[in-house]
Amino acid sequence: MLNIAVLVSGGGSNLQALINAVEAGGINGRIVTVVSNKPGVYALERAKKHSIPFKVIPDGKDFDSLLVAHLKENKADLVVLAGFLRILGKEVLDAFPKKIINVHPSLIPSFCGDGFYGLKVHRAALDYGVKVTGATVHYVNDITDGGEIISQKAVCVKPDDTPETLQRRVMEEAEWVILPQAVADICNKERKDRKDG
């Protein structure tokens, strides 16, 4: 069973999707810590409601080293960025190679990279006039949204969509589906590898 750390910066709806999947037995892992770079966000309330330990590490020059220490202390096997609005530095990436995944609210390589987060992604998709958008789960490397793609799910854009309505539908129809599934697949693969090894 893998130890999962979830990093959040806001409301935590993707965290909730992960919690629901773990509690339903759909993920062969346990969430050992939730970390936020912002105090007082609702994601921490979600962690508290489910008795999951959480920690706030405020943005600052020592953020990466404090995060690495906390993740190692909690023996994290997999780090999941679930609406985490901060770029991780080399120290974190080196400490957890191919062990960090992110969910991004577009079909990478469209509308991704530096500056593309939250409603900005959906506004850009609507401004461009795409008929299909979606979400992507990918490994995290030193290029923003540039790591190997794990899974994607498409969502149709409706003619009357606003950035807000599109964001909600992409979360409900794509992010909350493919993020728990990707985590489940990684946990199952790890369990099989350990058994075979």
Image: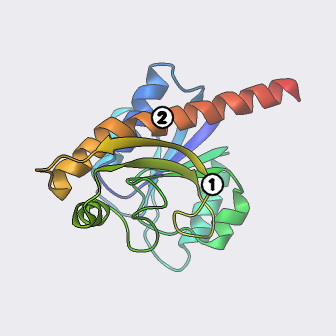
Residue position for label 1: 148
Q: Is residue 39 left or right of residue 66?
A: left
User: Which residue is found at the position 58% from the left and 70% from the top?
Assistant: 143
Q: Residues within 10 Å of mark 1 (few under 14, many from 20)?
A: few
Q: Position of residue 148 (x, y in %)?
A: 63, 54
Q: Is residue 100 left or right of residue 179?
A: right
Q: Is residue 197 left or right of residue 98?
A: right
Task: Measure how far apart labels 2 and 1 are at the Cα level.
Answer: 17 Å
Disc 2 residue type (three-letter)? Pro
Which quarter of the figure is the C terminus placed in? Answer: top right
User: Which residue is found at the position 14% from the left and 50% from the top?
Assistant: 159
Q: Position of residue 36 (x, y in %)?
A: 42, 57
Foreground residue, 189 or 57? 189
Q: Which numbered disc, 2 or 1, marks the residue that appears first in the sequence?
A: 1
Label at residue 74? none
Residue position for label 2: 180
Q: Is residue 85 visible?
A: yes
